[in-house]
Image: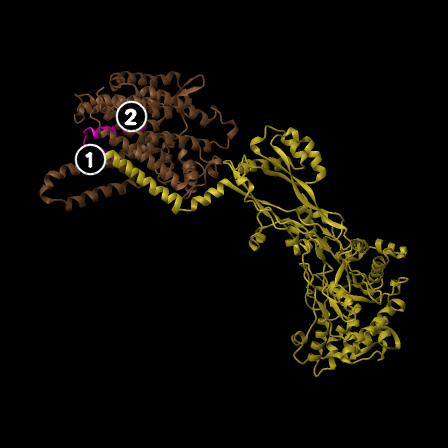
Chain colours: A brown, B yellow
Amino acid sequence: MNKLFIYRLDWTIIFCYLFLVFFGFINIYSSNYSNETLNNLSFNSLVGKQILLFLTSISIGIFILGIRTRFFQQFSSLIYVVSILSLIGLFVFGQTINGAISWYSFGGISIQPSEFAKIATALMIARYLSDFQTDIKNKKYLILGILIILLPALLIMIQADPGSAIIFCSLFLIFFREGLSFNYLILALISAGLFIITLLFSINYIIYSIILISLIFTYFSNKTNLKTRILPLISLVFTSIIFVFSVNFIFNSVFEQRHRDRFNIMLGIIEDTKGLGYNINQSKIAIGSGGLTGKGFLQGTQTKGNFVPEQQTDYIFTTIGEEWGFLGSFGLIVVFVILIVRMLNQAEKQTNIFRRTFIYAISSLIFSHFAINIGMSLGLLPTVGIPLPFISSGGSSLLAFSLLIFIYLNFDANRLNDW
Amino acid sequence: MIRNYFLQILTVIVAFIFTIRLLELQLINSDYKFLSQNNAILESPVFPDRGFIYDRNNKILVANQPGYDLMVIPENTTKFDTLELSQLLNITYKNFDLKFKKMMNFSNKIPSIVSGEISKERHAFIQEKLWKYPGFYLQKKSIRKYYYKVGSNILGYISEVNENDMLKDSYYQAGELIGRQGIEKYYENYLRGIKGKAFYQKDRFNRIIGPYENGEIDITPIPASNINLTIDIDLQIYGEALLKNKRGGIVAIEPNTGEILALISAPGYDPNLLVGKERSSNYRKLANDTLSKPLFDRGLQAQYSPGSPLKVLNALIALQEGVIRKETRFTCNKGHFYARGAFMECHCNIGTSNNLISAIFQSCNTYFANAYKNIINSKSSPSDGVNNWKNHLSSFGLGEYLGYDLPIGQPGFIPDSNYYNNLYNKGGWKASNIISNSIGQGEVLTTPIQMANFTAAIANRGFYITPHFIKSIKGNKKIKMFEKKKTTIDSIYFEHIIDGMEKVIQNGTAKIARVNGIEICGKTGTVENFINLEGEKIQLTDHSMFIAFAPKHNPKIALAVFVENGHWGSRWAAPIASLMIEKYINKSTNRKWLENRMLKGSLNDEYLKPLSGKPFKINE
């Protein structure tokens, strides 16, 4: 603790952060290039606003570096409540943009409270899990933990912003770090797998397959334990079959057509490059045309032609893919991996459970944005409107993620302090 | 503990999957590069201005003029008065409405052509009212402009390429223009130049938003060449006027160069008919006129019996074969028996004894029948005789394509022994069976240009240069060399028959063709002809035919004139030929009475006879 504060800062993370933000400026500028010229590069332009938001983030961030951990811990409940209220307030005062009621507007400045709700929920869940009473293996505590996350997620879901809602679910990942059985994760993965298989194949075939697999499994498994295993196995088979039927029902009767379309496009069940699949197809074309080294800064023909909609926000990765090619895209992925892995490593060094859990929350949020956004751009996931952290144009997102980074820097630098 | 690392592992797995996907999209699968070019870059051709066409005296015949397409971007239109606009464009309201809906279905953002090839005059008129119709605008494009109403058969025309053209030559793309007939077709490669390319950046609505790479990779077009034709446009105009209300052809050639001075096919049509908006309907009208067949080039494509002019060639062959001499005489008794019970009539008086020269200017059938018989019988068998005769004629360019530089033509026909062996039994025929060939009536068929060409060969005393239309191509481009072809007849023999041909005008069958101060040599023809009318072979009024060259020494022009159903050679063809010669050599004509008779004369009544369905008289 003798070292100066500045030496205790995690410079790896700072460099990653700055790299991503500046790379973001470049690509926002490029994806909007046809509408802007260098001459009117002002704070009114998209990049200008982004730079302004970055400067704001830095100023707030420096202030954050000086706050004690205990402050976050003590105020997390209050922040959470305020955040939930702000989400509820959207129903009354919110502005509808692109069909989603996710914006407050104060004289030209738009704020997306769901972005800040991510911080609030992360703080709240860290606070909850670090409470010495909480035992996540206990069903009672688990359910409360789930509710803390699901409450904002559901509110946002109702406001027709399913992408952001899904992001909140990534916070469940922390539970596994804090001792929740991995069986839940495996169950979730199996369900997701079954879900997709149900969409791809005829329901009869799936049921036959499930029965066949379970029979084969029974035949080859250790005969001595058979009696103890046969019941859970049979119940598993039945649960699967019921699940498959319910997925079928939900998909066809509960989902709206546009949601069904998104899944169908992703899975290649319907091919419609002009209508429903336009975004994904154009996105793949833009990225694919980049080749190894890309077409160069401002040289992207797909980007200039505005073929990919929402290119400066949700589809910013297509600009990177087209203009910076495989090398640029891969480099970006590497930087994200370094950022996330480094944070998690540092988190493990924490002795304070609140701090560790909170850093896990930050990492989970960045990871889920990273995975879903790029997965969507690459056509691996259905279209979900969420930004790429630090890169996508959008003030609230940049500000929220910057604050998360600064809180991390604070927590990490004060790892050995007990305040 | 796995719990301390699982999120790291998950991150790395996801990054790994992304990397694999990136490799697939960006490095392995090249489809996307292609697709990107397809949808973001517009490759647009840049056309050089089509080359101009001049006549031999540098008078401009064909140039370009601005034409206008009325375009519309449906998205940009506001509510407008459809009825008024359709009236402005001379389109029915219904058609217009249908068209407009089609365009909107095609694209709201891409311009479509509402009305194509609007003339300059109408353009001004429409332009004035266009302010009422936002979204509509006039787009300039280049169309052909013809300075004279003649020569359409030579010049040809241009029109948009069809699928066949595109299959044949990948240079062309839909909507581009190609030479369709005549010079426009034959010299297409010179006249069109080579188009360049411009690349544009498109946006997702397919709108052009600027040049691609600042136009650095654009390809500049190679300019087209202007060309000069051998045609003398004044002579062409004059010839077309002379053949007005007649059917037939005139071909005039400069003998020592093979340059075609005029090629007239009557009835012709105004080349401007095939320009602009009305092209397709006009073309249909011309193509559907199966009676006067304006699209049929009678100078190049019509195969007629040559009639008496062939006597001149037969005389040359007889001289060359040594079966007659200049002094050889045959006696004519208003004709002669060429075989038992077979009499060939002639208009000579009983007891006329003709030598070669008088036989030519009297056009004595008897003389040439005898000469022809001698040609055939000079060889060991009639077969050899006919084949030998055919060889001589072939050396004058008869019986095969001449090889001139227009895309249409006919070979004509010269029979050989195989033909007669098929027609009769082998060995079952002799000279008397094919005696009609002697006077140009038998199986021989020639086109007017072939006749003009052999006239030029006679004028040159034994050779011809493949007739052609191209004089020069601007920009020092080498033009195809047209070969000099020698005939099989020695040049000394030509003088004999040329003397005879001169007499034809001086005191023979074509005195009417005399022109003071010009020694014209010629030969009339009166060609019997038949048509098949509902399965019946019916004889029509004879064709009027004349070949001539002038002056006798150092000839400047050789020509063949053919007037269908003109009755006899010196009635129409000879006067027309002499007027053409006079016009060409003296640049003006003195014999106004003759000129007026030719210009005003009409054979339309004659042409209507076989169509009337009533019995009719011929040669009246």
User: Is A67 a magenta residue?
Assistant: no
Q: Quadrant of the rendered structure where residue B297 is?
A: bottom right
For badge 2, the amino acid type reads Tyr
Q: Is residue A211 toward the left or the right of residue B227 in the image?
A: left
Mark 2 closeness class: few <14, some 14–19, many ≥20 residues within 10 Å? many
User: Is A187 a magenta residue?
Assistant: yes
**Residue highlighted by disc 2:** A408
Q: Quadrant of the rendered structure where residue B586 is?
A: bottom right
- Residue B457, given in percent of the width and then of the height, sits at 77, 68
Q: Name the residue furthest left.
A: A224
Q: Is residue B394 toward the left or the right of residue B516 in the image?
A: left
Mark 1 closeness class: few <14, some 14–19, many ≥20 residues within 10 Å? few
**Residue highlighted by disc 1:** B2
- Residue A345, given in percent of the width and then of the height, sits at 24, 32
- Residue B453, given in percent of the width and then of the height, sits at 75, 65
Q: Is residue B569 above or below residue A68?
A: below
Q: Is residue B319 toward the left or the right of residue A114 in the image?
A: right
Label 1: state its secondary structure.
Answer: helix
Query: Magenta stretch: dominant SS?
Result: helix
Label 2 resides on the chain identified as A
Residue nearest the observer in this picture, A197 or A93: A93
In which quadrant is the N terminus of chain A drawn? Answer: top left
Residue nearest the observer in this picture, B396 or B29: B29
Q: Which residues are magenta?
A: A167-188
Q: In this rendering, do the residues under marks 1 and 2 share a single chain?
A: no
